[in-house]
Image (cartoon, grey):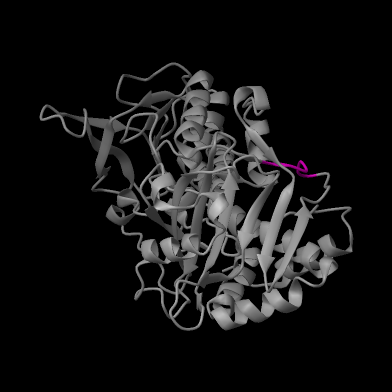
Amino acid sequence: MTESQSQPLSEHSSPLSEHSADVIVVGAGPAGSTTAYYLAKAGLDVLLLEKTAFPREKVCGDGLTPRATKQLVSMGIDISEEAGWLRNKGLRIIGGGVRLQLDWPELASYPDYGLVRKRDDFDEQLARQAQKAGARLYERCNVGAPIVDDRTGRITGVHAKLGDADSKEKREVTFHAPLVVAADGNSTRLSLAMGLHRREDRPMGVAVRTYFTSPRHEDDYLESWLELWDRRGPGEDRLLPGYGWIFGMGDGTSNVGLGVLNTSSSFKELDWREVLKAWCASMPADWGYTPENMTMPIRGAALPMAFNRQPHYTKGLLLVGDAGGMVNPFNGEGIAYAMESGQIAADVIVQAQARATPAQRELALQRYPKVLKDTYGGYYTLGRAFVKLIGNPKVMKIAAQRGLTHPMLMKFTLKMLANLTDPTGGDAMDRIINGLTKVAPRA
């Protein structure tokens, strides 16, 4: 049997057995749950395996741009204020002594508002929506090694352990499917076990954040600080690397955090939790960003950017979201691209399922990396150039001082950084941005 002669996907919509399915999705974050949702909606039998139990925390800014909002609408999620979602009108940018408030652009392709929601609740909503569509969710399911066909090298399932992390009684199980989707985040042990390692030539970021009880909890705008100053003294104020954010959560708290890129010379040297503390200490006292008002410990997470793990399909395994390094290098946004890649992967799998022969199914599956590169490749290439530039705090300072005084330039920058344009029929800014992404190499 050749590699292209993969096992056919089942034509049954009912479960093949308790531990077998048409597709296994490992990880029930935004990427995995979105993939499982669209697969189940199309009638495929899907196993969605999540190592923790909901609700569970995830390090994130909790702010969603219109790109992510569009994905939630497509999945039928109730995003009303009555359902606990806080809407925002745009982005407030602070730097170079200037405060500029920019509304999200009015586009045919995306709504003109973003959302805020804590990740523990957000992720569970997506997972439950996938369940409603027919996906079979296993929580407390810790996936280990892949099951590989010795003859073909293809993944045919996974080994897993069921049970609480603290429990001594864990049940070992095997799950089988002709296709597996790795949605297991930046660490993606499944991808590593299949020989897919991180590309060192792609940018990596780190985000650290915490929550404070604060009067600034119902802001109509997401707030981004392009300069992080340590004003604790003695001596001159010190410009710290990275960018900061303040997102009101609408529940009496603010999500306050910072992101830094590995293009910064200080990336490996500094304790980023201490950098965040220093920045918070420089804030006005009445905002309440003080240790006694902190409601959660400072936590950090890696931001895998710009396709830093490839190929996105090989030997029966598809990578979605952070597992495939889908984070936008321009702004650190991951949720929108996790959900979009999940929808793309599901569409490719559904189309493959309808093919008559193993060779035809394999041909359809090989299309997945090509669609991703056509969709994001040029944009991510531009983003890689951008992060090299802003890794220097002095460059960021000059850009803030010069750029923020030109509202039209900043409107263009917002569209570029948030990847918000109309693909056809847009304005001049849209056409310039779309043109740049088309001519940039799709690596």
245 horizontally vs 155: left or right: right
- The residue furthest top is 14
Magenta residue check for 33: no
- Magenta span: predominant SS is loop
- The residue furthest left is 168
Q: Quadrant of the C terminus?
A: bottom right
331 horizontally vs 14: left or right: right
Q: Is residue 193 visible?
A: yes
Residue 382, how many percent across, how many down? Answer: 64, 71
Does residue 368 lie above or below 213 as drawn? below
Residue at image coords 48%, 19%: 13
378 horizontally vs 259: left or right: right
Residue at image coords 45%, 71%: 232
**Which of the 4 image quarters holds residue 85?**
top right
Q: Closer to the camera, 18 or 75?
A: 75
Q: Magenta region: which residues?
A: 109-114
Residue at image coords 65%, 58%: 374
Q: Closer to the camera, 92 or 422?
A: 92
Magenta residue check for 113: yes
Residue 381, how many percent across, how many down? Answer: 60, 70
Does residue 233 lie above or below 94 as drawn? below
Residue 276, how many percent across, how many down? Answer: 44, 62
Count how many numbered circles sit on residues in the image. Answer: 0
Q: Can residue 80 be seen in this view?
A: no
Residue 148, how many percent across, how many down? Answer: 26, 45
Q: Closer to the camera, 244 or 375?
A: 244
Residue at image coords 89%, 64%: 428
